[in-house]
Each structure stands twice: as structure tokens, then as C-alpha cells.
Amino acid sequence: MGKGVTRAKNVTRWCWTQVSLCPDSLLKGHEGGRFTVKRMRFGSTEILAIHIALVLLALAAGETGAAFEGITADSRTAGMGDCLSASSSGARSLAPLPPSRFSGTVSFSYCAPFGVEELAEKSVVCSVPFRRKVLAVGLVERGESLYEERILSVSASGRPLARVSVSICLGLYSVSVSRLHKKRFVGLSGGARVRPIGSLEACAGVDNFVASRSERALPQTLLFGLLIMPASDVTVSAEMRKSAEGSSCLHFGVELVAEGGVCLRCGLETEPVQLAAGLGLELGPVSLETASSFHPVLGRTDVLTLTWRGKEGCR
């Protein structure tokens, strides 16, 4: 695989994992460090429409001879919430919430054989908080894939919402488990990405975050993104996010790659306006990244992420 394609994969996954931004919807109930979150969920029709759109994108890519890059789910390893990303992911901010009743999320996606090689994928992920316990189940059945890799990522963020996250990606899917300052919670997310033309990438996905002590699930979010590399060392991405409560926001980001595997990343989010910047260093399969995000209410959050990447791909 060429250098440009490999770099695009790296950027798709890691360019905005460092950009941690708390959605405005979670700040509406902010008083004295506490949050109140309303019950907000997407209907099954909206989620089904997303999966159908992803399959159509994959089929279009196969017909034009482009390689379907695979379905992926990456944890948002940075700070307190939404990140700018051209790839689906999920780590949302969480504050102390009441004991739960019952809440769950089930996701199913399927991609039929197409194009260059056969690719058959089924996935079921379920997150069920009950009382003070969390149950997370994942089931994956996969055929021969065009894109296989193994990723282990450990991330730690500082106050005001200190958190430690661990993300594991095997093949096309990943699951992240996080601990937020004496509270436990599990985050699951999923999506897909394709490269239909040259260095242009398109992605879509669903983010969902469920707390072990939450009476209601936090907002699910649909995301659609585009990423393009105008030069081998420059990447620009844009992403639109729509939460279950109906609010929308835009994310913009730029990555600059220098010699020696050093990457400079910066991002901007609207509603409210927030900034984030990060610096990463890649040494073979291992990368170390640090970043800071700036929120108008919650202030600054620093994040440190260590990542190990396995197989790049089988093409």
C-alpha cells in the first residue's frame, strides 16, 4: 500500500481522537459540577437508514474498483466528549447520574460481497446498564476482509472529568471501556468508511454512550464526515454531528505531518465554539500523542494517549 494511503488511514483513526469537546446539550443542566440529561434516543428507522447508506457506498466503491476500507469503531480517547474525527468513534462526557432502571442499545450491520474480494460482515453490540452493573456484549462474524489490523490504545485525561480509557480493535470492530473518576461506564460505537475517489474518504456512524449509574442513556449521535489529502503531508477533514435531541454541530480539522513521524493536529467545533490541538509521535507500530481541549464553561482538559498498531492491511 502506498505511503499516502497508509497516512490517510492513520489520520482517519487518530487525527481527531485528541480533540475532546463536551456537547452543548450536556451543559444545559450544569450547576455546581452536576449535569441533568434527558432521555434522547434515535428510532430504529434512522439507524437502519444509516446502515443502508453505508452498504450503498460500499457497493459504489466496489463498482469503481476502489477498495472498501472496512467497518471500524474507534473509541474517542480524548478528554470529555465529542471529538473531531473522519471516523466513527465514541467517548462521551459523563457526570454522576442516578441509579438506573433499564436501558440498552442494539446495533446490527451487514455488508454483502462486492467488488474486488468478498466481504461479509455481521455485528451485534449490546450495552445494558441495570442497577449498578454494566453488561456489554459484542458478536462479530466476518468473512475475508480487505482491511485487517489490531490496535490497542490506552488514554488518560485530567480534570475536570478525569478518565482512563482502554480501546481494543481486532479487525473491523473495536470496543472501549472507560472509568470516570469513581464512576464506571462502557462506551460502544460503530460505523463504516469508504474511499470512492483517490484520497477522498467518506464515513458515517453512530455514537452511543451508556453509564452504569445512569437513569437514562446519554444522547446518541449520528455522524457523517469527509476527509481529503490535498498533499501527502496535509489532511483536511469536516464532520457533521446530529444528536438525538435534534441539535447539530460541525467539526473541522487539519493535520500536518513532519519528518520523523511527528504530527501536528488542530480542530474547531461549533455550538459552542471550542478549540483543541495535539502533537503526536509515531515510532514504528507505537505512537504517543498528547493534546489539550478548551471549553468555554469547563475550561481546559489535557489528554495523553499511547497506541500500538498491528497489521496495516492485507492489500
Image (cartoon, rainbow, N blue to C red):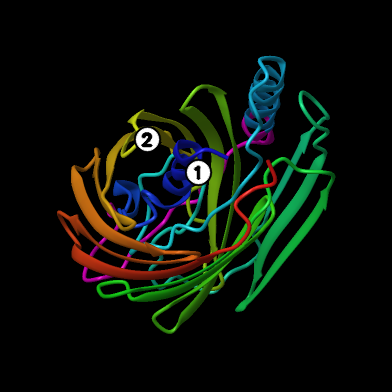
For image coordinates 46% across by 64% down, the residue present is 284
| Tag in front: 2 or 1 | 1
Above or below, comparing residue 287 to residue 82 in the picture: below
Q: Is residue 274 left or right of residue 97?
A: left
Q: Please report the residue visible at 60 percent of the width from the left and 79 percent of the height from the top.
A: 132
Observer-nearest of 91 and 38: 91
Along the viewing direction, whichever of 214 and 306 lies nearer the viewer = 306
Residue 247 got which mark? 2
Question: What's drawn in magenta, residue-wise?
Answer: 27-47
Instruction: Name the secondary structure under disc 2.
Output: loop
Q: Nearer the viewer, residue 268 or 136?
A: 268
Q: Give the answer, above or below, for where 209 lies relative to 99.
A: above
Side (left or right) of 207 relative to 25? right
What is the count of numbered marks?
2
> Mark 1: which secondary structure?
helix
Rendering coords of residue 33 (x, y %): 25, 70
- Is residue 216 visible in this depiction of the protein? no
Q: Quickly name the residue at label 1.
A: 6
Q: Is residue 63 magenta?
A: no
Q: Is residue 128 left or right of residue 277?
A: right
Name the residue rendered at 71%, 22% in the picture: 62
Look at 46% across and 49% down and name the residue there: 10
Q: Amino acid at mark 1?
A: Thr
Q: Is residue 272 in view?
A: yes
